[in-house]
Amino acid sequence: MKVILRNPRREVDVPGGRRVKEVLRELDILPETVLVIRGDTMITTDQFVGPDDVIELRPVMSGGRDPR
Amino acid sequence: MKCRKCGGQAVLELRRHNAAFCVDDFVEFFRNQVREAIHRYRMLERGDKVLVAVSGGKDSLGLWDVLLDEGYTTTGLYLDLGIFEYSVESKSKCEAFAAKRGVPLIVSTVAEEVGAPVPVIKAVTRRPPCSGCGLSKRYLTNRVALEHGFSVVATGHNLDDEAATLFGSVMHWQTDALPRQSPALPSTHPKLVRRVKPLYRLSERETAAYAFLRKIDYIVEECPFAKGATSIAHKEILNRMEDASPGAKHNFLFGFLDRARPAFERTEALPLNECARCGQVTTGTLCAFCKLADQVKRAV
Ligand code: SF4
Ligand SMILES: [Zn+2]
Ligand SMILES: [Zn+2]
């Protein structure tokens, strides 16, 4: 399956046929830091992703902002 | 995973709330959190003229979207920082949002106001870019709000932003910064406009999910200067704690607001003057913004 990562945008191939949380663990990404997007919706980390699936792991962090 | 409300397919799990939601019920949850924030800190009233500081990112455009749906009278303010492609793209996101919703957007350009864009300010001052940038944003937002008669400025700061700021202040025991950290800052001078953060109860992941599910076209790419900012490092640490113990960020921030912050509140207020040059509020004679503009003008 294909995983799209951002900042900078890139793609990695990982084995499918398992849950999203296992993919996240393999890529060392904390669930709290990304949205898991498949097609035009989001999926929870207990969902299975197949070998032909494409998911985007979109980072949610925005930074450096002025505290006030 | 099933939606806690309706039992339908969930799109997002919120571990700290021990819940998962479908699209519609998540959007409702999000709006309820904003309503709760506004109510708890009496942030906005129906008659308020609200200036929403927008950057083109998920938080500020999401905030604008919610406030519009809640029926508030709002105008966007975009500050063009002159940070290469990032500024070009983020500005066009704000303009597109405003056009789509048919709402007014004010654009103010840092290069015109200070004399140079943020990358040049950074080079001239030899300080981290966020320092001159943050100072200019704070100053210009307030001045624009005053000039146009807005009663309140709303910003898109979320729970993670607030927890990271608190973490930074506590790490250095900046006891003067602690009482200033609040979801709502009252006006302490006729020339200081009230500031509110209606998203302070929502995590960064929740604001990103809201923007995505509401199909808001926001800028995903970060400001190039954000990398290496200490606030990012603090956010990463907090996210590790959150992963080990869901609710950690929430408890850290809300515990401070409810129980610790009052202990740091100062009784004697700092004397506030008006800047000899621009008339905006300062504790000195010349305000920090005018000093920065002088420094930039000497150099370029
Ligand atoms: S990351 Fe720093 S330089 Fe970039 S917009 Fe935010 S405050 Fe300004
Ligand atoms: Zn539901
Ligand atoms: Zn001044």
Image (cartoon, coloured by chain):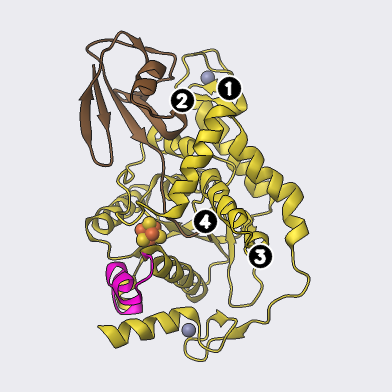
The x and y percentages for residue B56 are 35, 51
Residue identified by numbered label 3:
B186
Q: Which mark is residue B19?
A: 1
* Image quadrant in which you'd find residue B82: bottom left
Report crowding for label 2: few under 14, some 14 to 19, many 20 or more residues within 10 A (C-alpha): many
Q: Taking B209 as reference, is B97 above or below it?
A: below
In the image, are marks 2 and 1 on the same chain? Answer: yes
* Image quadrant in which you'd find residue A11: top left
Q: Which one is earlier in the sequence, the residue at label 3 or at label 2?
A: 2
Task: Identify residue type, mark 3.
Answer: Pro
Q: Which mark is residue B73?
A: 4
**Is A39 displayed left or right of B143 in the figure?**
left
For the stretch drawn in magenta, the main secondary structure is helix
How far is disc 3 from disc 2 in space, using C-alphas?
A: 35 Å
Identify the residue shown where x is 32% and y is 73%: B121
The x and y percentages for residue B161 are 51, 49
Residue identified by numbered label 2:
B23
In the depicted view, which residue is nearer to us: B151 or A45?
A45
Callout 2: SS: helix
Q: Nearer the viewer, mark 3 or mark 4?
A: 3
In the picture, one chain is yellow; tell me its letter: B
